[in-house]
Image (tube, coloured by chain):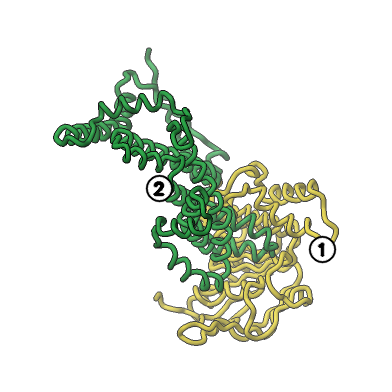
Chain colours: A yellow, B green
Amino acid sequence: MQKFLSIENVAMAFDTKRGRFEALRDIHLNVAKGEFVSLIGHSGCGKSTLLNLVAGLLVPTQGVLLCANREIRGAGPDRGVVFQNHSLLPWLTCFDNVYLAVERVFGSGEQQRESRAQLRERTHAALAMVGLTHAAEKHPDEISGGMKQRVGIARALSMQPGVLLLDEPFGALDALTRAKLQDELMGIVQQTGSTVLMVTHDVDEAVLLSDRIVMLTNGPAATIGQIVEVALDRPRERLKLVANPQYIECRRQVLEFLYQKQFRPAA
Amino acid sequence: MNITATVIEMRGPVAAECPVRAAPARLVVAPPPRRAGPMLKRVAEVVLPPLLGLVLFIGVWALIAKTGDRLPGPGKTWVSAVQIFSDPFYVKGPNDQGIGWNILASLKRVGIGFGLAALIGIPVGFIVGRVAVLNAMLSPVISLLRPVSPLAWLPIGLLVFKAANPAAIWVIFISSIWPLIINTSVGVSRVPQDYLNVARVLNLSEWKVLTRILLPATLPFILTGVRLSIGVAWLVIVAAEMLTGGVGIGFWVWDEWNNLNVEHIIIAIFVVGIVGLLLEQALILIARRFSHEYRA
C-alpha cells in the first residue's frame, strides 16, 4: 500500500505537575492517498492528541510522522484542520475567513503569487462546494452551527491540503444536521479525492464514512487496538446501508471493541 | 378601523437554514396600539426616574442653601450661569477669559496628554501581554507607579519642564497611561486559544497574526482602557490646573474661590461633570460601533 501519510513508532508523553503522563505509545499507521480513515475510541484515549501530532501542533516524544515522504515539522496548510468548534474569526465575514486561508497558501511569495481576482475565485469556489455562496457576506454570529462548521470545512478545503484532518467536526451539532453534513462531506471527498483522517466517537459515522476504522485502546498509554476494514462500495447511501450485512458486521466489530474489549465504566 | 394581527409562517428551506439568532419560524405582527397609553408609559418609565433624581438633588441643595448662609441656592446659581454662558468666549487678558476658552484649554491638554498616553501605552500593553519575559520585567514597575497620586507627579513635571502647561500635560500622561497598558495587556493575553490555533494551522505571518487576529480580538479591552483613561485624565486636569494656573477650567475654579464667587464654583462643578459625561458617552458610542461588528 502506498504510504501517503506515515506514522512510525510514535509515542507521546506530556510532562505534567504530577509527573510524566504517557498519552500514546507504539503507534504505527499508514494511510494511502485518497483513503478515509477514522480514529475512534473512548474519551481521553488520545485520539485528538494523535490528530494534533499529524497536524504538527505537537511534536512526538518518540517516532516520526511523514506526510508525502516529508517529515511533519509544525503546522502547515498542506494539512488542513477542521476543529470541533469551528474557530471562525468572528470579526470577519465567512468570505474573509476562507480568504485568509486562500491568501496564505496561494497569495504569498514562495511560488508564483496569484492575483486578487484569482484568490477571490478560489474562495468563492470553496464556499460553493459547501453550498454557502449565499452566506458569503455574513458574519459567523449570523449563521447557524451547521453553517459555521461548513465554513470551517470550506476554509480547510480551500487550501487544497494533502490531508484533511477533522477533529470531531460534527460533535457539536444536532443529529439531523450531522447526517446532512456527513452526506455532504462524503460528496466533497469523492469529488476532491482528499485523504482524510477523522476523529469521531460516533460509531455509525465512522462506519458510514470511512474506508478503515482505527480503534484506540483506553488511555493512558493508548495504542492501536484493532483496525476494521470497511469494504462497502461508494457512493454510500445511509438508508440502504442500514440493512446491509457488511455494514452491520463492521458496526458490530466496532461496538464489540468499544464496549466489550475496552469497556470502561462511567467515571 | 379593525386591524387583526397577521401571522407569518416560514416554511421549507428557509426555516431549515434559519440561523439560531434570527426570528423564530412564526413571526407575529401586532397592530399599533390603539391608545397612546402604553407608549407614554414606556417613555415615562425611561425619563421619569432620572428627572425625579435630579429634582430631588436640586431640592436638597436648595434646602441646604436656605438653612446655611454660605452656600448659594439653585436660583442664584442659575442666574449666574446664564450670565456666564451668554458670553463664553470673551478675552479680557491672559488670565481672564470666557468659560468657553477655559473648557477648550482644558480639553486641549487632556487631548494631548491622553494622545501621548495612548500612543505609548497601547503598544507597551501589547508587548507586555505577548512577551512573557517583558511582562515579568515591567509588571513590578507598573504596580509600583500606578497607585501614585497624580498630584505627586506635578512637582517632577514642573521641575523638568519648568512651565505650567507641559507639566499639566505630563501629569495627565502619567496618570492616564496605566489603564491603557493594563487593559491592553490583559486583552492580548486573553485572546482565545481557538483563534491562535487558527493562526498556527494556517501558519500566518506575525504581521497577519497581529492585524487579523490580535488587534480585533483585543479591541474591546483597548476601548475599555480608553474609557477609563479619559475619565482619569479629565479628573486629573482639573486638579492639576488648580495648582498650575493659566487658562483652564481647574484654574477658573481656583480663581473664583479666591474671588469668593461661590456660584461660579458650583457652576464649574456642573460644567466639569457635564463635559466628563459627554466624553464618556461619546466613547461608549464609539465602542459600541466597533464591537457591534463582531460578537463572538
Residue shown at 67% from the left, 44% from the top: A133
- Work out whether disc 1 and disc 2 sit on a shared chain: no
Look at label 1 and name its amino acid. Glu
For the view shown, which residue lies furthest in the top direction? B1
Question: Which quadrant, please, contains the N terminus of chain A?
Answer: bottom right
The mark total stands at 2
- The secondary element bearing badge 1 is classed as loop
Relative to A150, residue A251 above or below: below
Residue shown at 50% from the left, 48% from the top: B165
Relative to B213, residue A260 above or below: below
Picture quadrant where residue B12 is located: top right
> On residue B51, which mark appears?
none
B234 vs A247, left or right, is: left
Question: In the rendered image, which residue does mark 1 sit on?
Answer: A110
Instruction: Identify the subunit bearing mark 1.
Output: A
Relative to A232, residue A123 above or below: above
- The secondary element bearing badge 2 is classed as helix
Residue B224 point in image, percent of width and height:
47, 51
Residue B61 point in image, percent of width and height:
22, 35
Nearer mark to the viewer, of 1 and 2: 2
Residue B157 point in image, percent of width and height:
49, 57
Residue B89 or B220: which is nearer the viewer?
Answer: B89
Cα distance between the residues tagged 1 and 2: 54 Å
> On residue B235, which mark appears?
2
Instruction: Identify the subunit bearing mark 2.
Output: B
Residue shown at 48% from the left, 53% from the top: B225
Res. B291 visible in picture: yes
Residue A218 point in image, percent of width and height:
51, 80
Residue shown at 75% from the left, 73% from the top: A32
